[in-house]
Amino acid sequence: MSINIALPTKEGTKNAVVALPVGGIVPLREAVKQCLGHELPSQSFTLSDTLKDITNDEDVAQLLDGATLVVTNVKDGQLAAPARERISFQPHPKTLTMAGDYEYFAAQGRHPFVYALAEFIDNSLRATRNNAPKPRNISISLLTTGTGAAKKGLVCIQDNGCGMTKHELNDWAVMNYSMEERGAQPQEPEAEGRGRAPAPAAGRFLTGDLSFFGSRYRNHEAVYEEDMVHRNPGDTSTLSTMESPFSTAATNWIQEEVIQPEEGQNEAFTRVIIGDLKVDILQQLADDAGGAQICRELAHVYHYYLHGEAGNRLREEGLECPTVLPNGEPLPNIVLRHAFDTRVLWERKLTEVDDDLETRMLRAHKSDFTFSLQVPEKGIVNGVLYYFPYENDRETVPLEAGPSWAVAAARPNGAGPTQVGMHTQAGGANGRTHAAAAVGGTQFGRTTQAIGGAGGSKEVSQDYVSDDEDANGLPHRSSIFSAFWQGRLIPSAQVDSLPFMDAIRQKRTAATKDTLPDEVFGRLRGALFFGPGFRVTRNKLLFRDNLPEVLSTAVPGDRNIEKRFRDWLSRCHSTLDKSFRFSNLINSREQAALRARLGEGITAFERISDGNRTISTGDVVRISAKPAVIGRVVHFTVPQAVRDDGAYSNGRVHVEPLPKGIHGSNGPAKDFSLRRLDTVLTGKETEDHCSKEMAKLPMSLRVEPMRFATGQVVEMVAGDDVPETSIAVLNGGGQKLVRAFYNGEKQALMVTQNLWRLPHEGAVLPSVAGGGDAAEGEHGVKEIVESESAECPAKRSRKGRKGKRQQDEETAAADAAGEASGGAHASSSSSNPAELVVSVENKTPYKDAFVFSRISDGLKRAGHYVLEYFLTPVVEGQPPLRCTVPLVVGPGAATCLKIAGEGVVAIASRVIVLGETMPPFTLFFQR
């Protein structure tokens, strides 16, 4: 083991090697004198590692193998001249084992320039995380000069952090030398638990431990191998050729090193210079007027570091903004500026950016839902959901704006991946360490990844192309959650949903979809905050962990999270969404009647609009229900007592279902959630619907036996039995029915059989009197049945009458005599009503038909009869569906002479005297 001794002189740097260990400061100084005695300016000199002077045995004991000590003047601590030290950084052995990981893929369509800057900001945040109570200043200068092909660019990132020694710089530059191997693995802050308060930064994990990996590697070569320059503060003699075109700015930066820092300011600093910017980067800077896009994306990435755990919404709400993070560190002050030559084109503080996506979400949402998840072997994930309601005829979910320069459509002159040169200056208390190198490795676009250094760059073609990109090459924003790791956005890592959200969505019934429709889930956005237990790719664009798989095993911190989420989402939809604009209040009389029926907290309107269509009272609409409902709009209601037109939530539409023949016109209108409104029907569509629906109702009655269905007169003889008959009820499609929709509900059908005896041939049944008027015909049947049943109770069951009708024999004989005389009596009185002989109701169909038993005693007298069948219920506004079978009953041949009358009684009761006048006799023939 050994250390290097560097003695800067005007002729160059003299170097010596001293073996370790040495006994202390005195043996060390003696060894230096022996090696460089004739070169030393005097016997009084100081040894320094550029961060502090080595003055005692304890400092010597802490020296590491390979350390470099610089000889300075004992009086002022200044170097006689800049000293150069050759450095070479090698890859970590894990390079081979990790060489196939997904992290090597391209940047998923995102332009790498902003995220390359973010890598250096990560380093600066880590370097300044222990600055308190001093501020954390990070500045990024973007310099351009020249025009056309001669245009050049330079980037300078500077912070007032702790700086880096040679060994720390070596650790930073070793590829895959993670913080865990360095012994600096960040620990997750302890969350709130029983009996203890949460640790600082536990909510958003704002620890500042962001510089997680070392730098990249170029094939089997070192990341870079260059001279580290040690110089005095303010010494401009070491400017590189890369800095020469920007000598004014570079000189100013170096001269600022000798300015005495103000009280409370940090003397240490780190400055990184990046040169040799490619043409597309320079064009991007030129196109980004005012730095809007660069600042917007960086403000999104570091949103919670810039504004604290509450984010950038307190200023808008007029509240006092925090000045420190939860762990006590001051909020970083990150400034970007763009200068052309010596003229500053723009300068912005990231804290002043208010149009980044996270700020717009925090300011636009109307309600939030916080939760936590415990992931086994990973730690806690904190989350928040935001609800963006539908307002003012539009959705309010903020959309991520894509830059026009996101991905170049073509590379001029076959330009490959972006390559940058890097110039690192790391200063301690006196800011004297100056290392010059050129490091590539910035990822570009979707197809190439560059791994290069001072000696050039090599393009590695990638087959991976994201399928989830729009025309600009940016990923679609279809996921609900963005992901933050250690408080920093991981831009390409998004989470579609979480198990407790999916459970609520899948458990919805048709009824609960009125309170939780599909669109409310589209109005959710949120953020998940991951701690150090999760792994990210080296470019910090993605997680190395499979987030959906990992989160599927997470245990919610609240056992009732599903119920709490469902209630919150229902409340958001019912109180915040203003999906429709209501106008034209109905008149006060109808309003009062409606409130008396539905409640005082109801207001009805005649018109609604959602920005794309307007629906008014009287329109025929289709309602998405099971089954679908077609109806005429009566009015629209909101569950609030309001007096003016406006946009309201949770409205309903009240409709009269069509056709009225099926649903009725006197019943109350049906009401549905406005989300069930499908479309407005035209007149032709309405007519077609009504015709189609009416065809589902009974349209005809089919009678059996067939001789009763011909429509011809059926001849029978008095005393014959009316045979068994069956009635099939058919709809417009010829299908048999036993049930049908009437007045909005399915009802059982009933067929009534009536046997009428007409007073004379050609007489009209009372049921059709009035020339076929529907209303009169319907009421006529009812009147006949009621009046006739009152005079002669002929109604019987389907099995027939239980007994025979009693009739006076004399009256029967007189009727028979009248028939025998040709019915002269009947024809002489056309006003005599038809006689209802038998009436039977059948409500119990058999094999889809209504069967009636034979009538054995209905045709006792000759004459004209009608066998009638009619259906109930009756379609509103139409006559009952009926069919008739005309019967002509003849007297038939006589079989015996029968004597009746008072004379028969007189002969049977007493002796008749000769010459006595006999009472009248009646003679008639009987079969």
Image (cartoon, grey):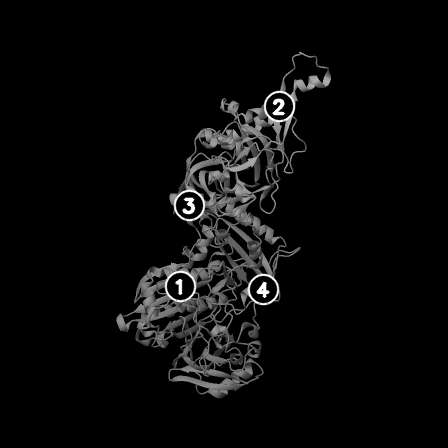
Answer yes or no: do the residues labelled 2 and 1 have beta carbons within 8 Å? no
N-terminal-most mark, 2 or 1? 1
Q: Is residue 814 visible?
A: yes
| Pair 4/3: label in front | 3
N-terminal-most mark, 4 or 2? 4
Q: Secondary structure at mark 4?
A: loop
| Pair 2/3: label in front | 2
Answer yes or no: do the residues labelled 2 and 3 have beta carbons within 8 Å? no
Q: Which residue is mark 1?
A: 470
N-terminal-most mark, 3 or 1? 1
N-terminal-most mark, 2 or 3? 3
CA separation in Å, label 2 and label 1: 108 Å
Q: Which residue is mark 4?
A: 188
Where residue 763 appears, as percent x and y from the top left, is 49, 29
Q: Residue at x 55, y 47 (%)?
A: 511
Q: Which residue is mark 2?
A: 923
Looking at the image, residue 43 sits to the left or right of residue 10; the answer is right
Q: Amino acid at mark 1?
A: Asp
Q: Quadrant of the N terminus?
A: bottom right
Residue 772 lies, with reference to residue 552, above or below; the image says above
Residue at the right extreme, as displayed: 910
Q: Secondary structure at mark 3?
A: helix
Q: Amino acid at mark 2?
A: Leu
Front residue of this view, candidates 356 and 266: 356
CA separation in Å, label 3 and label 1: 43 Å
CA separation in Å, label 1 and label 4: 37 Å
